[in-house]
Image (spheres, rainbow, N blue to C red):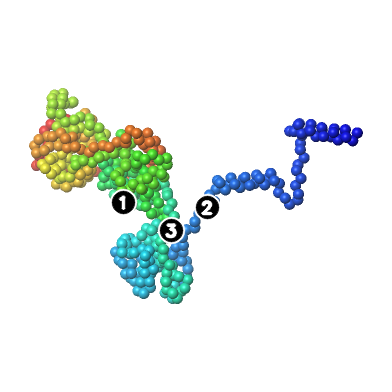
Amino acid sequence: MLILAAASGIMAILLLAQVGSSVVQPPPVVLAGEPDAGALDAAVDSDVDAAIDADTTPPAPPPWRVSALAKDPTIELIDGAMAKRTLLNALTSSGIAAPAALRLVHAFDGIRTFDDSGQKDTFVVAREKATQRIVAFEYSASPFDVWQARASDDADAGTYEAKKLDLHLEKKHVAVGVAVGDDLRASIVQAGLDDDMLPLLDDALEGHAELSDLRPGARLRILAVEDRADGAFVRYEALEAVEYTPAFASNDTKPLRVYYFAKAPTTTWLARSAKQHESAKTPSFFYDSKGRQPMQGGWKSPVPFARIASRFNPKRMHPVLHVVMPHNGVDFAAPQGTPVYSTAEGTVKSVGGGGPCGNMVQIGHAGGYTSAYCHLSRFVNGLHVGQHVESRQLIAYSGATGRTTGPHLHFAVKRGDQFIDPLALKLDGVRVVPMGDRAEFERERAELDLALDAITLPPPVAVPDAGVTTTFDAGSDEVFEESP
């Protein structure tokens, strides 16, 4: 009987095991003070996941700076700029005793020489008020290039430990709108940018506009990446894109946009900026919205990238008079108010009314050449006969004055008394983004366009409308007897 009972018990246990999920198993016994094994495993897994997701490396603390002693009542800080002086002279001129200044200079032996100090390089000395002992010194060539010397622990030794500070660079995206006033540099700084932006703008707009063309009333949108150290500006890592709206632009004048594109496909704005910084000494990689980049020749196009509406043709049928009449120049399609530039260096021969040409400018060039610009809506204020102009200098704005069917620029060139085809002078050419890179360029352009569109465009600086300057010199030979 006992055997049967035991067998029945075993069978019952086996049956319960087969049912499995329908039977609530008793909880495991846990001794007091011991953690539950399942909970422990879960906690370990959670900690591992958190460690993977989080950056376990704490950020390095910023290096100690001499400015930290500013609040110490026993210390005085003495600062100055190099201003074309030797460091020894700059220190002694600031009241540092010559022996102490000499020890500071020698502390940097093998670390840094100060023979090539920049005029704007600065220094700061921390000196004990009671003993006149120098406890620390810093020399800054930029917010990122800082050298420091600190007094050794032995106060009587008069020696210093010198080194270059290991400062962490932070990258910051910059998206700024600029209203150009009387001073472009001041306008850039007022918008919160460093004036180091000016040479980058010059590079980006090359072939499209000169910095001198950015007259009061013009506006800019700028996308850039800058490096900062300790919260201070160090340099621009990259200029990514620029939008330029000229002064006096009409409603149908589209702003110019140029984009940095270096052909090497990248996935992020920051990665592109690093590529640009590495290739800072290479030719410009800025293209307009159609993927074009100017290639400058000896003679410049008066309206960069403008479409040619009508070519030089001695037997052309005149569109207004409907008679065969020579077309002694080239017509560039240009909406009202498009900037017009001098094709080459020269001297202004006339500014004013030109009969059928409307408002006209003539410029004399070396070699007996004369260029003429017709149907202008306005001249640059102050342009006058006898004025020297540079190649690609802004001289006027396109229009529809004189005998014309609509706004455009009629551009003509004479060699002596003979009209020649202006295109024979090999005006600026155009480099385009290769077809194999067009998809990548369009993707990056679309990304940068969204960022440009998000920048609030400031209202233009109010400038008086100077109107049309009328200083036509009746004594000079007029290029045109008849004009389109």
Question: Label 2: few (<14), some or many (≥20) within 10 Å?
Answer: few
Residue at the extreme front: 3
Residue 202 vs residue 356: left or right? Answer: right
Residue 230 higher or lower than 255, as above or below: below
- Image quadrant occupied by the N terminus: top right
Q: Are marks 2 and 3 in contact (CB under 8 Å)?
A: no
State the image coordinates of residue 61 (x, y, percent, origin top left): 49, 58
Question: Label 1: few (<14), some or many (≥20) within 10 Å?
Answer: some
Residue 341 appears in the figure: no
Sequence order check: which comes first, mark 2 or mark 3?
2
Identify the residue position indicated by label 1 in the image: 185
State the image coordinates of residue 111 (x, y, percent, origin top left): 38, 63
User: In percent of the image, x 70 and y 46: which residue is there?
Assistant: 37
Identify the residue position indicated by label 3 in the image: 166
Say which of 175 and 41 sits in front: 41
Residue 224 higher or lower than 418, as above or below: below
State the image coordinates of residue 128 (x, y, percent, origin top left): 44, 72
Residue 90 higher or lower than 307, as above or below: below
Sequence order check: which comes first, mark 3 or mark 1?
3
Q: Are marks 2 and 1 in contact (CB under 8 Å)?
A: no
Identify the residue position indicated by label 2 in the image: 57
Q: Are marks 3 and 1 in contact (CB under 8 Å)?
A: no
Quarter residue 38 falls in: top right
